[in-house]
Image (cartoon, rainbow, N blue to C red):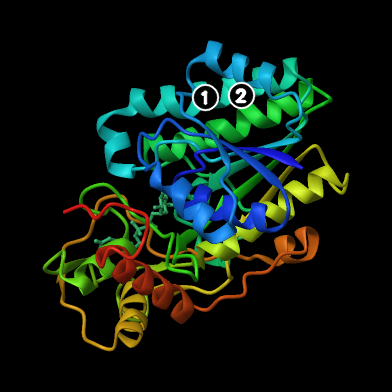
Amino acid sequence: MKILVTGGTGYIGSHTTVELMQKGHEVVIVDALFNSRAEALDAIETITGKRPEFEQFDLTDNTKVDDFFSRHTDIKGVIHFAAHKAVGESVNEPLKYYRNNLVSLINILESMKKYKVGNIVFSSSCTVYGEPDADNLPISEKAPIKKAECPYGNTKQIAEEVLEDSVNAYKTLNVIALRYFNPVGAHESAQLGELPFGVPNNLMPYITQTGYGIRQCLKVFGNDYDTPDGTPIRDYIHVMDLAKAHVAAVERMANGKMKKQFEVFNVGTGKGYSVLEAIHSFEKASGKPLNYEIVGRRAGDIVKIWADPSFTNNELGWKAERSIDEMTKSAWEWEKAYRQGKTKFKVEE
Ligand code: UFG
């Protein structure tokens, strides 16, 4: 199958592209390279032996999106990753987030309708659940959607509504929204991994960069929460397990296995780990203590959330396989390979 992967040079998009290509699918990537690097294409080629097709443009430009679909009439499905995703930035620049994340989705849906492309997998997030009530943990897809904590989270909620309204109106459209928990880790080749621009916002790249000495000290945002060790709990999921969930989703659509036109799946492991547990797992992987200090809480952080993945396991036929130790180990191997110049990515300060 030929699949359009938007945001395919980004962290999750590039790993998913590898998995799709290794399953025999043909991938065409569209990415504006706002928050990713073209070297991801070289890395994908190194791993798979094939280079995905690539076009660089901004999906908020409707003329370009239309032109793209008019030239690629053999596309059988879309996986839409391309979006801005920094929580803090979205608070300061909400319009940037609403424009980019929503206009691009609407443009894609309009072209899919016009050019009769039926299937789209959408990158959603467990952020739509907000802070779950204690009796809703582990959290299932049936849990209530709470008011979003930030504009970024709101774009994911609104996008799900746009998609649901669209399937109700357009009978040719099928949608699977995957609600990711916390993706971490890297491809086992260490040729591909998470590589944020500048100072990382997320825990795992901050940990690996501190482990390598790029950052002096990891700040742990609060140890006075209502959890066993006082630090927040997340459902960390290996990015390659997440990649496989996308392949399962596109194949479910293509094989006519959907039960409804709009389906939602949690993509998590079902296990929660605290920040300190994630740090200790990394220390095992690297074989040395990590320099960290406890500081004050970060505004807007959820205290604890982990998935009930049973619906996804049973219905999508997908299950996360890799442990937290495999996640931190692969993230560490990637960080070292990248810093030592052993990958296709240019080493940045
Ligand atoms: N953390 C630290 N120090 C850091 C970075 C993170 O202690 O330097 C802690 C956070 O306080 C949190 C945990 O590590 O307790 C995980 O934080 P991340 O930023 O890695 O992930 P979040 O769960 O906050 O955010 C993720 C995604 C968002 C999404 C959000 C809610 O990155 O896109 O989940 O679904 F919105």
Q: Are marks 2 and 1 in contact (CB under 8 Å)?
A: yes
- Amino acid type, callout 1: Ser
What label sits on residue 104 in the rendered view? 1
User: SS class of the residue under badge 1?
Assistant: helix
Which quadrant would the C terminus be assigned to in this image? bottom left
Which quadrant would the N terminus be assigned to in this image? top right
- Amino acid type, callout 2: Ile
Compared to residue 49, the image places residue 2 above or below, namely above
User: Which residue is labeled 2 in the image?
Assistant: 108
Percent coordinates x, y for residue 96 in the rendering:
34, 25
Percent coordinates x, y for residue 237 in the rendering:
51, 66
Residue visible at 44% across and 55% down in the picture: 131
Rendering quarter of residue 273:
bottom left
Percent coordinates x, y for residue 38 in the rendering:
40, 41
Q: From the viewer's perspective, is 346 left or right of 309?
A: left
Residue visible at 66% across and 17% down in the picture: 110
Residue visible at 42% across and 30% down in the picture: 32
Residue visible at 80% across and 37% down in the picture: 261
Q: Residues within 10 Å of mark 2 (few under 14, many from 20)?
A: many
User: SS class of the residue under badge 2?
Assistant: helix
Count of number-bearing discs: 2
Percent coordinates x, y for residue 318 in the rendering:
72, 64
Rendering quarter of residue 253:
top right
Q: Residue furthest right?
A: 256
Q: Residues within 10 Å of mark 1 (few under 14, many from 20)?
A: many
Q: Nearer the viewer, residue 83 or 295?
A: 83
**How far apart are the alpha carbons under marks 2 and 1?**
6 Å
